Amino acid sequence: MVKEFPDDTLTLHTDAYQINMIQTYWNKGIHNKTAIFEVFFRNMPFDNGYAVFAGLDRIIDYISNLHFSESDIEYLKDVAGYPDDFLAYLKDFHFRGTIRSAVEGDLVFNNEPILQVEGPLADCQLIETALLNIVNYQTLIATKAARIKSVVGSDKLLEFGTRRAQEMDAALWGTRAAYIGGFDATSNVRAGKKFGIPVSGTHAHALVQYYMNDYDAFKAYATTHRDCVFLVDTFDTLKSGVPNAIRVAKEMGDKINFLGVRIDSGDMAYLSKRVREQLDEAGFPNAKIFASNDLDEKTIQNLKMQGAKIEVWGVGTKLITAYDQPALGAVYKMVSIERDGKMVDTIKLSNNAEKVSTPGKKQVWRISRNSDGKSEGDYITLWDEDPRVEESLYMFHPNYTYINKTVTDFKARPVLQTIFEDGKLVYDRPSLAEIKEFARRSLDSLWDEYKRDLNPQDYPVDLSQDCYDNKVAIIKRVREYVGKLKF
Ligand SMILES: Nc1ncnc2c1ncn2[C@@H]1O[C@H](COP(=O)(O)OP(=O)(O)OP(=O)(O)O)[C@@H](O)[C@H]1O
Ligand SMILES: O=P(O)(O)OC[C@H]1O[C@H](OP(=O)(O)OP(=O)(O)O)[C@H](O)[C@@H]1O
Ligand SMILES: O=C(O)c1cccnc1
């Protein structure tokens, strides 16, 4: 049985090594040194051309409530055995740092900072795990949702994933992320209550199984609900399900909104065409065909290619579990640290050029053309650079510098916005509807070449010359240092 604590917090939702490191920092008196960490991911999820950022709203609540409660401290004392003086420090802990982040619904790309934390070393360290946990999942699902949205055109998308999600938290927050990414409604009633997402649904096979025939089941539903979508595949879609749905719709007339029928098995291209004919012939051209059953963007696209007459798509498992890529690999890396009263940029080296981190406190600028607002790429600068004052920008690939271009007549929009300043929330939280609309507009500004779901072009994520030079100089310095080591 799970232990319940009236003063429970999310503060211990962290890896033990974070608290152990904080203990070391505290013991060595370096816990208040200023540090800067940045979050980024190396590979695009689903090999997609963009990712839709989500998770900030939950991060804001998490940071705002970050403190060690009595029961947290007791646990750390009794079970984990931390010493009293360290626990006394934790007891007074609250987050004092500055967080800058991409905002929800914005597009983000690999190898660029999507969130930045600056503040006392201990404060920055504690929150790594939760930040990554939130951003990795929600951004993944928002991106998967956007991929699915990209193939349905003006059709409606219903999120049906709760029963298959990796437990309740994932169902709830995944639904919200799916809504940001382009879904229209969810079957999860609690998500409706908590986030104001439209709730929508049909009925299951159990209703028909109870009555043992389609007609009685549909009639029972129709006499108790105004909006009706009948599930027609329990026994025989074309011979029983649809004819009985039509019969009930005719009998009930204006007493119900006959919205349509749902197909949940069989050859959905073939069935939907025949069902469309049956509904049209019966005088219900506006009744829509809903479909569900292990759908994802590939199956939907294929069904559309086959001329399926489906207008509402219920998608569960493959969306909410991010079936084809179950994790976004965003990481949290230190990019700068205070040493002898000065900030010193830091790097994580690797034999793989793609894995070498980019040192220094940075900003990401979304560069778009003034003529039509289309994105030219992202331009990463050191924090004190401002490309808005430049007439032209020389943009080059950080690993393949021969890939380059000069951009003029451009707009540069900072992607990282200040959310918390020295521990204080300074960001005005937009509504979920505004976030969803922002995601839609952000996608509009992206060229189709980056949006196709198969083998999209790589969106340019470039470093400014100063940022590049800083990286090269630090790599050189570290290599020299390692070269001189003697054991
Ligand atoms: N015309 C079609 N073209 C491509 N895929 C389809 C088509 N019709 C259905 N599908 C997909 O094929 C898969 C069929 O799966 P499955 O065999 O489990 O379903 P089923 O036998 O029809 O129904 P049930 O889930 O009740 O067993 C589903 O993912 C479904 O979305
Ligand atoms: O397939 P998904 O994308 O996850 O969509 C949700 C599924 O949940 C329901 O099925 P149910 O749990 O009754 O199982 P079944 O239809 O697979 O038998 C519904 O009928 C969908 O098939
Ligand atoms: O409302 C529905 O049709 C529904 C909801 C959850 C899962 N499958 C279907």
Image (tube, rainbow, N blue to C red):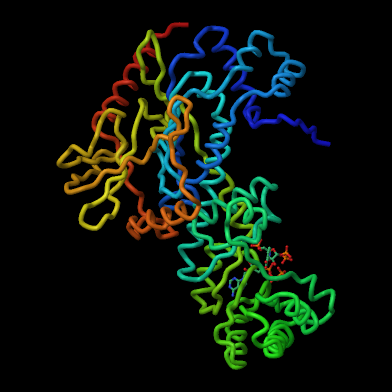
Residue 149: image x %, image y %?
A: 49, 62
Q: Is residue 29 above or below residue 119?
A: above
Q: Quick one: 332 or 455, which is closer to the camera? A: 332
Compared with 365, 215 (above or below) is below
Q: In the rendered view, would you say 234 is above or below 82?
A: below
Q: Quadrant of residue 288?
A: bottom right
Tell me which residue sits at (40%, 14%) in the image.
338
- Residue 158, given in percent of the width and then of the height, sits at 59, 64
Q: Nearer the viewer, residue 81 or 69?
A: 69
Residue placed farthest to the left in the image? 391
Judge left or right: residue 410 versus residue 96.
left
Front-lying residue, 74 or 226: 226
Residue 406 occupies which quadrant of the picture?
A: top left
Q: Is residue 189 above or below residue 379?
A: below
The quadrant the N terminus occupies is top right
Indicate which quadrant contains ligand 1.
Answer: bottom right
Please give the name of the residue rendered at 44% of the width and 24% of the height, measured from the top-left corner.
422
Q: Residue at x 41, y 48 (%)?
A: 106
In the image, what residue occupies the spot 45% across and 69% down?
153
Q: In the rendered image, which quarter is residue 257 located in?
A: bottom right
Q: Position of residue 390 (x, y in %)?
A: 17, 38
Give how far across and how far down residue 324 sits, in percent: 57, 53
Q: How many numbered tags mark residues here?
A: 0
Give the side of residue 355 with respect to residue 322, left or right.
left
Lateral position of residue 271 relative to residue 103, left or right: right
